[in-house]
Image (tube, helix red, strand yellow):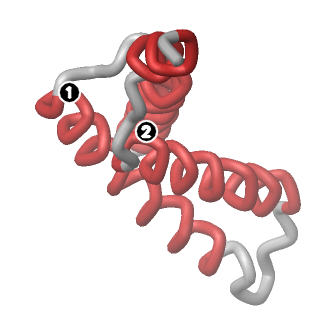
Amino acid sequence: MEYVFFAAVTGFLCALLLGFAAAISTDPLPVWGRVLLVLLLIPVLAFTLFGFAASFEPGDGNWIGKIVYATVFPGAAATIIGLCRKRRDTTNADDESHSG
């Protein structure tokens, strides 16, 4: 059972890294790529939110887990927001500023 948990966590972290890389890349992704990454990151948000809440149950003194949950959740949320935002085309903005 521990291997299944490890595989799930690894998949979530890989989805987070892919989404983060896509959100900060200079080349915009097609709409289907952004939708796919957002759909991959939604389970990461749920996993970290419920994991953080569950880490406060009595008898659990794992502070490393709390820190990991508390850092991965805002990263995944910021990545989803970055992927959902409409990107400005910087090449057109630069051309318009030099035209006048």
Residue 25 pos. (x, y %): 50, 16
Q: Secondary structure at mark 1?
A: helix
| Residue appearing at x 65%, y 70% in the figure | 52
In the figure, 32 relative to 81: above or below? above
* Type of amino acid at the residue the image marks with label 2: Phe
**Residue 21 position (above or below residue 84):** above
Farthest left residue? Answer: 32
Q: Would residue 57 be visible to someone looking at this image?
A: yes
Disc 1 vs disc 2: Cβ atoms closer than 8 Å?
Answer: no
> In the image shown, does 80 or 92 lie closer to the viewer?
92
- In the foreground, 21 or 89: 89
Residue at left 39%, top 35%?
Answer: 87
Quarter of the picture holding the N terminus:
top left
How many numbered marks, from 0 up? 2
- N-terminal of the pair, mark 1 or mark 2, is 2
Q: Position of residue 72 (x, y in %)?
A: 64, 49
State the residue at coordinates (19%, 36%).
36
Give the secondary structure at mark 2: helix
Q: Tell me the number on the disc at residue 12.
A: 2
Please tell me which residue is depicted at 70% across the width and 85% down the height of the picture: 57
Query: Where in the figure is residue 79, as x and y percent of width and height?
Result: 51, 43
Tell me the crowding category of disc 1: few under 14, some 14 to 19, or many 20 or more residues within 10 angstroms, Cα based. Answer: some
Above or below: residue 59 compared with residue 31: below
59 or 44, nearer to the observer: 44
Crowding at dot 2, Cα within 10 Å, few <14 / some 14-19 / many 20+, comes out as many
Q: Is residue 95 left or right of residue 97?
A: left
Residue topped by disc 1: 33
Q: Mark 1: which amino acid?
A: Gly
Is label 1 or label 2 in front? 1
Q: Position of residue 78 (x, y in %)?
A: 57, 50
Q: Which mark is residue 69?
A: none
